[in-house]
Amino acid sequence: MKPPILAGLIGAGIQASRTPVLHEQEGDAQGLRYLYRLIDLEPLHLDITPCPTCCTPPNSCTSPG
């Protein structure tokens, strides 16, 4: 099996998100070990306001497509 791929969702109040299960199931179907983690700021008592700073270079969240 290929090395695992780690992906995630950062937000507030996202514990009910079905995204992790969908991504991991599709990864399995494609022969990939796809690990999808939720980083929910609400239970951590963190404000979502500073989150855009995590998407600045060199960790840019923009894509060419």
Image (tube, rainbow, N blue to C red):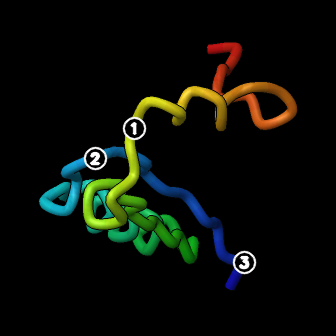
- The image quadrant where one finds the C terminus is top right
- Assign a secondary structure to mark 2: loop
Quarter of the rendering containing residue 22: bottom left
- State left or right for residue 25 relative to residue 64: left
- State left or right for residue 20 relative to residue 6: left
Q: Position of residue 45 (x, y in %)?
A: 33, 59
Q: Please tell me which residue is depicted at 68% across the width and 85% down the height of the picture.
A: 1
Q: Position of residue 31 (x, y in %)?
A: 54, 73
Q: Please tell me which residue is depicted at 52% across the width and 69% down the height of the picture.
A: 34
- In this rendering, the count of numbered labels is 3
Cα distance, mark 1 to mark 2?
A: 7 Å
Q: Which mark is residue 56?
A: none
- Looking at this view, is 41 or 26 the one in front? 41
Count residues near mark 1 (Cα–Cα under 10 Å), then give few for <14, some for 14-19, many for 20+. Answer: few
Mark 3 or mark 1, earlier in chain: 3
Q: Please tell me which residue is depicted at 45% across the width and 65% down the height of the picture.
A: 36
Q: Which of labels 3 and 1 is toward the front?
A: 1
Count residues near mark 3 (Cα–Cα under 10 Å), then give few for <14, some for 14-19, many for 20+. Answer: few
Q: Position of residue 48 (x, y in %)?
A: 39, 38
Mark 2 or mark 3, earlier in chain: 3
Determine which residue is flagged by label 3: 2
- Assign a secondary structure to mark 1: loop
Q: Please tell me which residue is depicted at 13% across the width and 60% down the height of the picture.
A: 16
Cα distance, mark 3 to mark 1?
A: 34 Å
Amino acid type at circle 2 is Ala
Determine which residue is flagged by label 1: 48
Amino acid type at circle 3 is Lys
Determine which residue is flagged by label 2: 12
Q: Are marks 1 and 2 in contact (CB under 8 Å)?
A: yes
53 shown above or below 38: above
